[in-house]
Amino acid sequence: MRTERQFSRPIGRLQVDVDAIAECRALAADISAPVDELARSRTTVSLERACLRLVGVDGVEGEGTEAVPIPNRVVDEVRSAVGLECGVLIPFFHAVESGCGDIPSAARAVSSGECRPEWPEGLDLDLATERARKEAGIAVDLIASAATQRAEVIERVGDAPKPWLYLIVATGNIHEDIPQAVAAARNGCDIIAVIRSTGQSLLDYVPYGATTDGFAGTYATQENFRLMRAALDEVGEELGRYIRLTNYASGLCMPEIAAMAAMERLDMMLNDCMYGIIFRDINMQRTFVDQNFSRMVHSLAGIIINTGEDNYLTTANAVDSAHTVLASQFLNERLALSAGLKAEQMGLGHAFEIDPSVPDQIMLEIAHAQLVRECFPDAPLKYMPPTKHMTGNIFQGFLYDGMFNLVGALTGQDIILLGMLTEGIHTPFLSDRDLALENAGYVFGGATALAGELRFEAGGLVERRANQVLEETRQMLHKVADIGMFAAIEAGMFADTVRTPEGGKGLDGVIERAGGYVNPIEDELKTRVGVK
Amino acid sequence: MPAIKPYGDSTDDGLVQVSFTLPIGESERARQSALKFAESMGLQRAQVQHMKAMGPDFTFFVVYGASIHTVDPDDIEIDERDFPQLTSQEINRMIRETLKRQLVVVGACTGTDAHTVGLDAILSMKGYAGDKGLEYFGEMRVLNLGSQVTPEEVVTVVRDEQADAVLISQVVTQRDAHIVHLEQVRDALEAAGLRDRVVLIGGGPRFSAEQAAELGYDRIFGRATKPSDVASYLTWAVTERAKAHEPEAAPAS
């Protein structure tokens, strides 16, 4: 049974070097300035498709495996007819205004080749611009309504006490995911994440409709979002506790998935400024442009982003590389601020991945988790359970997960991904999730309030370790600042992975903006979220 | 050796523990169903030690019982390790002395899976579980092609770089895709006439070593493989092959 857990964020428990923290923030600002500039000077096919989706372009042309989403068709047609240097919206709304029908009909007409896109002149340009502005206003209102609707539902139903327990479903079939998610919510879970089908991050389109054929995960589609949202709203009403829904705004279609998430009132989205570059070999220009737009959408929709720093520790030694997590968090924070996200929307990620055979392992984990807590006092931190040292010994693994929960409780982590005792063996059994909730219910029920009473000894191991990681972070950010973000990625400074500005997937979808680039949705978003 | 049974706390008690979920709501009928199921698995005197409802339609059980089955370890054929475990110094020395050049390794994840975690664990300098990856060995040249590579791309790189060995990794799979992907690479190498020039290795959590023969691979590595296992095998296999192909030294006159 759930109890009110008396959650509080323990801040000021470690004597950390506050000047070093301030210096890290200043360095992150310097490092990310060229990224912001890149986002202002480029657009991408996915960003333009996201804008079309937001004004109501949807559906597919063709059937089965031949089906192509209409937003892709329209962007491709506009690109081949007049280019995308000035954006897709003006040529599209010119088609709408010049007799191709309403928005869905015009989209079909452009898609089928019946209506050839043109860049309008004179009065036609004024008409198209006026219509685009009007529809952009409606679209941005729609994004903003996600935040107000969520607040209304939470007001009526009640919110989940923190920490929020987060579980993953991944059957590949949305109709199978839903009963599993509902069962998890009934057993105490607060957040459901639907893992995406393997390889979706590298698709340059978003699949359509309800899907049943995902590989090791379920396709992120707008209909799948809608179905899961409805089911979680229903069970949330029953439980008197709002159940949050999570998906992934990452990969080649990051902005479109962000837009779909806003339209279907998802609550949290995995959205990292560099993950796609490093771990999926997606072109860095594409990623940086897309993450900026996606984050503005998330900001206005009241969505909490989840960043992917835990991934740095699954590939590297979690002690030696602890500072790479913190460095990336400072960069993710800075780039989130540049897109108008508030601190309370920054679910900065980290993980419990130290080799259990390392002496004082649990103290080191506490040092890392508490350091992150001290550096980001207002962020809803996302804490990831052990994966790398889960060996198949499920009994020992269950204990690691319990210790992970304990460290999470002691350091006031807000969002707790639940560890599975069968991690690394198979996708979780129904019973694995239930056992994970039982484990977490026990630890958080018994230890959450302890965070408020705990102090660390001055000069002790935890404090010394935290300051050492902070110092290594400062040094790393200095090195990145010295050569610049793009060169640093090219030099393999993040996760030992070398990526070049012209390499990776999706570069052909990056377009330099002309002086006459028009995007009233982006303009309106910037105004509302306070981005210049 | 005589046939043996599981050991709980005394010889031949045959005691095992199992846990499973039945798609039926928690009830006496559910408990009896679990016991009956345990009996069908060959468990005598089964006892449900823990029964818990997971929602209205499922029940989780922890069951103990004494198995009626035995196993004779001598009846089992196993593939004992046939290559030596080598240190990094030995690996570098063997390659230097036998090949007199770097050993060229091409690694790739083929098919739709974007997970390079297994491939990177074996190849990257960082390695895995405290073991350095193949990039760490000065006498190896590693070409990590990453994910979603086609069999044709593998063939091209093998030919252009005169590779000695090919590693194909498959992590996430469904409907035996991991097997099909390995077969595709083997077929492409055969079609290009390159199969016999390379040591061909497959790896991933769903494979077992016994699958090598049916897949036409020189070696398959399954779960819990460390980079040093692969490095040792590769060095042994490539250098053995090089020695076999060396022309007989002319007799001293």
Image (tube, coloured by chain):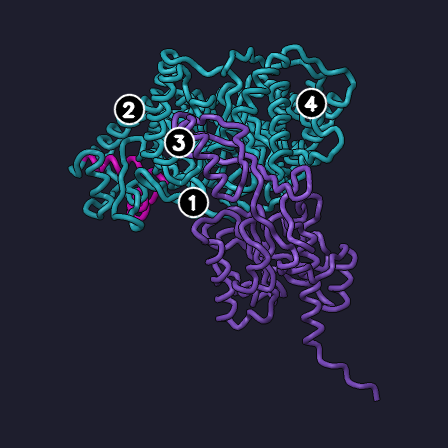
Classed neighbour count for the residue bearing mark 4: other residues with Cα under 10 Å, few (<14), some (14–19), many (≥20): some
Camera-side mark, 3 or 2: 3
Label 3 SS: loop
SS at badge 2: helix
The amino acid beneath tag 1 is Phe
Instruction: Check if residue A50 falls in the magenta segment.
Output: no
Dot 1 surroundings within 10 Å: few (below 14), some, or many (20 or more)?
many
Q: CA distance from mark 4 to mark 3?
A: 58 Å
Residue A138 is labelled as 2
Which residue lies under the disc numbered 1? A215
Chain containing mark 4: A
For mark 4, what is the residue? A20
Observer-nearest of A449 and B93:
A449
**Residue A501 in view:** yes
**Residue A509 coordinates in the image, percent (x, y):** 41, 45
Comparing labels 1 and 3, the label whose residue is closer to the camera: 3
Visible residue check, residue A314:
no
Mark 4 and mark 2: span between their CA atoms?
A: 44 Å
| Range covered by the magenta-colored residues | A75-97
Which residue lies under the disc numbered 3? B24
What secondary structure predominates along the stretch shown in magenta? helix
